[in-house]
Amino acid sequence: MHRRHLLNLILASAAFALPFSVSATQIRNARLWRSDDKLRLVFDLSGPVQFKTFSLSAPERLIIDLSGANLSGDFSQLALSNTVIRSIRSGHYGHGDTRIVLDLSEPVQLNSFQLPPQDGQGHRLVLDMKTAVPLQIAAAPLRETTTDKAHPKRDIIVVVDPGHGGKDPGAVGAKGEREKDVVLSIAQLLAKRLKREKGYDVKLVRNDDFFVPLRKRVEIARKHNADMFISVHADAAPRLTASGASVYCLSEGGATSATARFMAQRENGADLLGATSLLNLKDKDPMLAGVILDMSMNATIAASLQLGSTVLGSLAGITTLHQKRVEQAGFAVLKSPDVPSILVETGFISNARDSQRLVTARHQQAVADGLFEGLQRYFQKNPPLNSYVAWQQDQKKAQA
């Protein structure tokens, strides 16, 4: 009895002391500066912290996991231009831990350590990053080679289509969440990320709350000679339990009906949703024109399926999936005969859990980052002819 009483006292003391002895370390601020041979990033902390770092490639990222730490500061004031860091993002993971992700333009050699309070400074976590080429050399303009001058190195054009808009709110959640607002935010974040990546250019079908007809969305993609079209949605489902992201491409059936529509409209310019400028089928025999269009659609669907599979794989690490394979259906917005096109359902706004996540800035950013990583991986494997990414891949092969 004596031992049991003593044990109860110890447990009670531990429970009483826990709130006072275990408190989350605050990440209060971040500072950044460069020297001749390294880039130093310092996080100001309220106390010591346990942390670990690791790197990921394709794209290059440096991850810092801090146990029992909360972020109370803001990284937006950091001047990242002309540094190896493209962007900094953060989020919670596990139980009360914080993950910080540095998106990098190239791999770095990292030296990380903590400093105790001294000289008026508090606890600090220091990250010293060195690139393969010294920073003062890397910052200097490189002399163009003959190959570099000869190569046009055009940008890959991505057209991002936020679904619905204006008079069409799309799906509406139980608490009034509107699909058109959610997908516009995600599309804008994706466009912002694409603009920061060398070799890419992006066009938004809409950058505000206005309505764009389906046919017009496809015409915008074709007007900009898009290499890829992605339509972003967050739909509703009859079953409120339906949840998770999914990716759609045009079905073979859609291609067949599109051919039939083309044949019926041949007297009006023999076009499919404005496709005459590239396919140039006006002077072709109607039967031959139909075969050419069908072949183009089939090739485009095959590319879209590959693209969709890559994007779906990236989303799998960010959110649950409604379907683990790319679905196919006859979406009118995907019926461009020569532009690989996918429609991404980022989640179901009719599902309470999905809806709660979809309206948060953190989840919207994570989804946009996932979409970007999927697009980037696809184009690294399938770079368009004469693009900067294709030239970059050729340079890597030549150096291997």
Image (tube, helix red, strand yellow):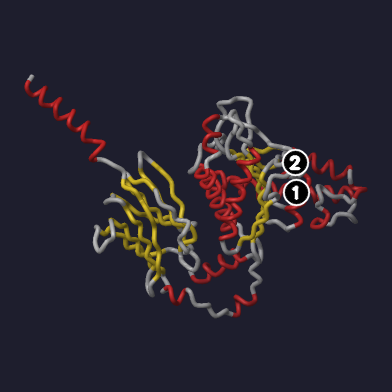
Residue 174: image quadrant is: top right
Q: Which mark is residue 332?
A: 2
Callout 1: SS = helix
Residue drawn at 45 percent across, 77 percent down: 137
Look at mark 1 in the image and give the residue it sits on: 218
The image position of residue 359, as x and y in percent, is 55, 39
The image position of residue 109, as x and y in percent, is 37, 65
The image position of residue 365, as x and y in percent, is 53, 47
Residue located farthest toward the front when viewing the structure as drawn:
120
Residue drawn at 69 percent across, 37 percent down: 169
Callout 2, which amino acid?
Answer: Ala
316 left or right of 39 in image: right
Callout 2: SS = helix
7 left or right of 81 in image: left
Callout 1, which amino acid?
Answer: Val
24 left or right of 140 in image: left
Residue drawn at 38 percent across, 62 percent down: 41
Does residue 263 appear in this view? yes
93 left or right of 123 in image: right
Check whether the beta carbons of the residues at disc 2 and disc 1 lie within 8 A of each other: yes
Distance CA(mark 2)–CA(mark 1): 9 Å
